[in-house]
């Protein structure tokens, strides 16, 4: 299940299309700042005011528990089924039936303390607050041009697995769902056309998110001290002189309103 999920304004705008934005906002939390710190000294490298997203894009930047988001979506599905607009939906949320995932393994805390020896004590202290520890592998895939074959198509990670450094995997999956359902509704009698229309809208955007996340991974983990210094100075200057303007530069990603795309 995982724990916290960051939902950027584009994810909230997609949830608006699905009619559940307010319910998710009610379950989420909006800290004052998004902060990036040095792994070793704890020094703040970058700090963004979270409210700036809401002001700029008309939707907040939130953190929700994954279980809460699923709960809201499951609740909405039941409502749709009750209203009789959709029949023959089977949503199976049975976590017991799927227990092994090769990219997530439970581990012993000693493995973590050995791997992260030398990291800032505030971070290391976090380990003592948990009774179980997991290690997760992080992978992405090169973007592909086609997601559909015949009557089968992909959405979410199966179509565009990306690294989590822009916090966009779930957001893209929700946007995919909005566009796919609209395309099928629009081309109700021609599934080939519907899937082509879906890919035309989604493939380029998902590609940009995959490659952008890869670039951010590189920037977050620079090996050379000089490159790190250059990056930190860039962030510091941006914070000092750019303030909330940094948020504007992310408009292509976080300010995207899938509802506008569908109108
Ligand atoms: C550390 C980390 C942090 C992240 N942070 C963010 C974030 O802040 N914001 C954000 O938007 N995204 C984030 N993501 C990405 C996000 O978690 C994924 O992109 C999102 O969960 C993808 O949703 P999905 O439905 O496509 O796939 P999944 O959530 O992986 O769902 C697929 C489901 O199918 C099940 N399954 C697989 N194979 C089978 C099978 N054969 N039979 C039955 N069931 C099967 C799996 O068990 C799983 O439950 C993060 C990811 C990681 C790893």
Image (cartoon, rainbow, N blue to C red):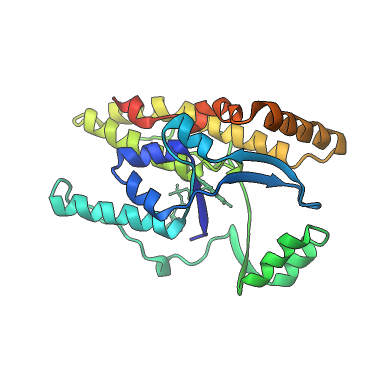
The answer to whether residue 174 is visible is yes
The mark total stands at: 0
Spot occupied by residue 172 in the image (x, y as percentages of width and height): 45, 39
Q: Does 162 sit left or right of 92 as displayed? A: right
Query: In the picture, which quadrant includes the C terminus?
Result: top left
The residue at 40%/67% (across/down) is 97
Q: Quadrant of residue 178?
A: top left
Name, please, the residue furthest toward the bottom: 131
Spot occupied by residue 78 in the image (x, y as percentages of width and height): 23, 56
The answer to whether residue 151 is visible is no
The residue at 29%/37% (across/down) is 181
Q: Quadrant of residue 69?
A: bottom left
Q: Does 56 sit left or right of 190 as displayed? A: right
The residue at 45%/56% (across/down) is 66
Spot occupied by residue 154 in the image (x, y as percentages of width and height): 40, 40
Q: Does 41 sit left or right of 220 as displayed? A: right
Q: Is residue 96 above or below residue 13?
A: below
Relative to the observer, which residue lies in front, 32 or 172?
32
Q: Quadrant of residue 122?
A: bottom right
């Amino acid at each position: 299940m995982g724990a916290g999920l960051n939902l950027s304004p584009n994810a909230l705008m997609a949830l608006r299309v699905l009619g559940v934005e307010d319910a998710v906002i009610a379950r989420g939390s909006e800290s004052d700042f998004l902060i990036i710190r040095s792994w070793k000294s704890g020094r703040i490298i970058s700090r963004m005011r979270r409210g700036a997203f809401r002001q700029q894009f008309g939707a907040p930047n939130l953190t929700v528990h994954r279980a809460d988001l699923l709960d809201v979506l499951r609740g909405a599905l039941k409502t749709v089924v009750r209203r009789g607009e959709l029949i023959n939906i089977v949503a199976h949320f049975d976590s017991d039936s799927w227990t092994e995932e090769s990219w997530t393994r439970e581990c012993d805390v000693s493995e973590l303390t050995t791997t992260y020896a030398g990291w800032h004590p505030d971070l290391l202290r976090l380990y003592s607050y948990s009774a179980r520890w997991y290690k997760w592998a992080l992978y992405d895939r090169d973007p592909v041009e086609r997601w559909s074959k015949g009557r089968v198509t992909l959405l979410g990670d199966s179509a565009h697995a990306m690294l989590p450094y822009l916090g966009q995997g779930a957001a893209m999956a929700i946007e995919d769902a909005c566009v796919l359902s609209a395309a099928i509704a629009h081309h109700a009698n021609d599934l080939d056309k519907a899937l082509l229309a879906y890919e035309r809208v989604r493939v380029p955007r998902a590609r940009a998110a995959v490659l952008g996340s890869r670039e951010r991974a590189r920037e977050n983990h620079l090996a050379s001290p000089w490159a790190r210094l250059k990056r930190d100075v860039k962030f510091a200057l941006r914070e000092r002189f750019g303030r909330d303007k940094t948020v504007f530069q992310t408009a292509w990603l976080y300010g995207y309103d899938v509802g506008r795309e569908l109108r």
